[in-house]
Image (cartoon, rainbow, N blue to C red):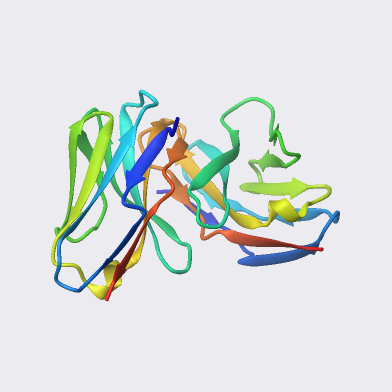
Amino acid sequence: AQSVTQLDSQVPVFEEAPVELRCNYSSSVSVYLFWYVQYPNQGLQLLLKYLSGSTLVESINGFEAEFNKSQTSFHLRKPSVHISDTAEYFCAVSESSGNTPLVFGKGTRLSVIA
Amino acid sequence: DTAVSQTPKYLVTQMGNDKSIKCEQNLGHDTMYWYKQDSKKFLKIMFSYNNKELIINETVPNRFSPKSPDKAHLNLHINSLELGDSAVYFCASGHTGELFFGEGSRLTVL
């Protein structure tokens, strides 16, 4: 079975500063990795995903994440955050066979301060 | 045009009552899910249906009964509601981990 650990439950950061949200996973088989974002009072939206190929994946709004197999990590980064990035961010993992449901981490609350 | 829609958005009810949440997706996905998000934002899968067939049933009390009349719909019925059932319930559809979520149904049991 897979599991996901998001070490930081809350990350406050000033506007235009860089941010890194950490995610580590555990699995005995190959996996797909995801970051989802949840804005207040909304459902989750897919931010970016790693399925195969390049280990660095990017989203359309400036976030990127790097799959590191040796460290079993998939940290999310953004070089300069905006107020509108304030949200809950969830890292998630599923088996690449597609036979297991998505397993989520406990989430990291990113608060961007003006 | 909403991709995954669930109703109602809010439910407030007394302990012991029965309630239902409906979910519909227009994305053509074969697989649909119900997730529960507790007050600490932790998301846990409850059920998964593929083409109207139950494929995942996590350790959820049997007071919770999903029903899928067709592959575009997955409804959730809850009997004998308890205080601990208070949460936000999310419906989702998709595959290979790429899920599309509804906006959630916030259930408050008094």
**How far from the left and from the top, in percent, is residue A24?**
60, 53
**How far from the left and from the top, in percent, is residue A42?**
50, 51
Residue A29 left/right relative to B32:
right
Residue B49 left/right relative to A16:
left
Residue furthest to the right? A16
Q: Quadrant of residue B48?
A: top left
Which residue corresponds to the image point at 37% horizontal and 40% vertical from the top-left? B5
Q: How many marks?
A: 0
Instruction: Name the one closer to the observer, A55 or B85.
Output: B85
Q: In which quarter of the image is residue B84?
A: bottom left
Instruction: Name the one closer to the observer, A94 or B93.
Output: B93
Q: Quadrant of residue B100?
A: top left
What is the quadrant of the C terminus of chain A in the image?
bottom right
Residue B62 left/right relative to B45:
left
Establish if A53 lies above or below B10: above
Establish if B13 lies above or below B72: below
Instruction: Name the one closer to the observer, B104 or A9.
Output: B104
Which residue corresponds to the image point at 86% horizontal and 54% vertical from the top-left? A16
Which residue corresponds to the image point at 45% horizontal and 37% vertical from the top-left? B99
**How far from the left and from the top, in percent, is residue A100?**
37, 40
**How far from the left and from the top, in percent, is residue A62?**
76, 39
Establish if B26 lies above or below A46: above
